[in-house]
Image (tube, rainbow, N blue to C red):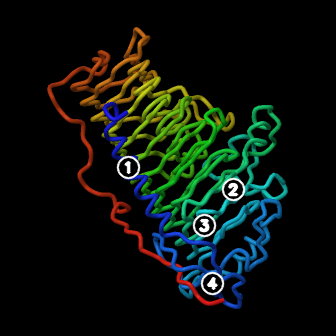
Amino acid sequence: MENLCPNLKSRNSQVIEMISTTFLLLGLALCLHVAECTPKTTPPDNIVFSALNCRKHSAVLTDFGGVGDGKTSNTKAFASAINKLSGLASDGGAMLIVPPGKWLTGSFNLTSHFTLYIHKDAVLLGSQDESEWPEVAILPSYGRGRDAPRRLSSLIFGTNLTDVVVTGGNGTIDGQGAPWWKKFRNGELNVTRPYLIQILFSNQVQISNLTLVNSPSWNVHTIYCSDVVIQWMTVLAPIDSPNTDGINPDSCTNTRIEDCYIVSGDDCIAVKSGWDQYGNKVGMPTQQLVIRRLTCISPDSATIALGSEMSGGVQDVRIEDITAINTQSGVRIKTAVGRGSFVRDIYVRRMFMKTMKYVFWMTGSYGEHPDNGFDPKALPEIKRINYRDIVAENVTYSARLDGITNDPFTGICISNVTITLTEKPKMLQWNCTNVEGVTSNVTPPACDLLPEKKPMECPFPEDRLPIEDVKLKSCSIASTVA
């Protein structure tokens, strides 16, 4: 692997070093003073972690009756704790610590100026009791749930929040999704499966340093949010699990996703902004998005998908330093007649891919619709899509680029790309219809619709997005005497 993937080796070394450093900074469970709460355990020495903001007050879940035996429901304990701590928002905010143990729980709601910290030896277990997953309102830009008209709350849920952090010492959230996957496959669902983390209508959001496994459906979904940082996440799902997208930024502005490792049954990252006429009406694009240092394994889906629910628009997306292994496609665009809106100003550079079906894939006929109310005249505008500095090995197809009749995808630029093929590659390496653009220094040579130009580099912005300059603070949980 050393010769095949030097960048991946270096990146993995950095990941191991950073994770090891994080583990060294973590201790055992603790319970600190919070208004009118008496600690029940003796806390350790300092725990240090990075966050958008540090909190003045802290408490541990066991202060509120939490039992970490993997059998007792902690849904009420989480609700009681967060309700109590929400009163401290105006006094420096508060943090709830989930100590070592297995903490069975249904859905619970976060609050503003709040940190949920999951200890490295803690596991949150998603309840198998569906009564602990309440129904929530349909997302206005979707018009219905994805599996069924109604939808359930996520395990960790928050709406209309400011300054909320979900982090830990690489603690685990296990959605125990297998029964949900079985119901989905058998057509037994009458409600949309829950996600693990969903944050709506919020700003200053951080989700970091966690391991998410076996989500019933999507893992992380931020929607109608701004100023979002998602980093150092490990997301694991069986590669045949249905719709277990890793991270889905949706109608969000100013988002940074970095240093994540995702194994998924669906897209590792899916960039969205609403579904057909509902997304058109809400009209909230995903924009000012940076994705970097991602490693993805997803044999049946994309490393990063733009769409297919993109009806609020997707623009100014910057993707760099990506590794994909045994994955169906690289950065894929998915759209359809009826979506309307746009995907534009997309910039991709420095990708390494190994064992891929497609390197480049754009689809203009991804025809799922929420209902029959979509406008068949609503055509998406796909333009200024830029890829450069890509190495791909053991590839079956170089590209499949399918625009829409009378609505071509334009301004496609691909430069400095080297693709080596599998032992049994497809004869037609570049299959292109209804697309326009240029290529430069691309092997194998592209289709006639993307002619070779003199040596050139496709653009990548030199400016920085505001979210790139947001620095996390070093926070600590100081020990006290019980």
Q: CA distance from mark 1 to mark 2?
A: 33 Å
Q: Earlier in the sequence, mark 2 or mark 3?
A: 3
Q: Earlier in the sequence, mark 1 or mark 2?
A: 1
Q: Which mark is residue 13?
A: 1
Q: Give the SS element for disc 1.
A: helix
Above or below, comparing residue 423 to residue 77 in the picture: above
Q: CA distance from mark 2 to mark 3?
A: 21 Å
Amino acid tagged 2: Ser
Asked whether the beta carbons under mark 4 and mark 2 sit within 8 Å of each other, the answer is: no
Q: Which residue is mark 2?
A: 154
Q: Which residue is mark 4?
A: 32
Q: Residue at x 71, y 91 (%)?
A: 36
Q: Which residue is mark 3?
A: 119
Local crowd at mark 1 within 10 Å, few (<14), some, or many (≥20)?
Answer: few
Q: Position of residue 221 (x, y in %)?
A: 58, 52
Q: Earlier in the sequence, mark 4 or mark 3?
A: 4
Q: Give the SS element for disc 4.
A: loop
Local crowd at mark 3 within 10 Å, few (<14), some, or many (≥20)?
Answer: many
Quarter-of-image position of residue 368: top right
Q: Residue at x 54, y 37 (%)?
A: 308
Q: Give the SS element for disc 2.
A: loop
Q: Would residue 214 appear left or right of 221 to someone viewing this image?
A: right
Asked whether the beta carbons under mark 4 and mark 3 sit within 8 Å of each other, the answer is: no
Viewer can see residue 250: no
Above or below, comparing residue 79 to residue 225 in the picture: below
2 vs 3, front mark = 3
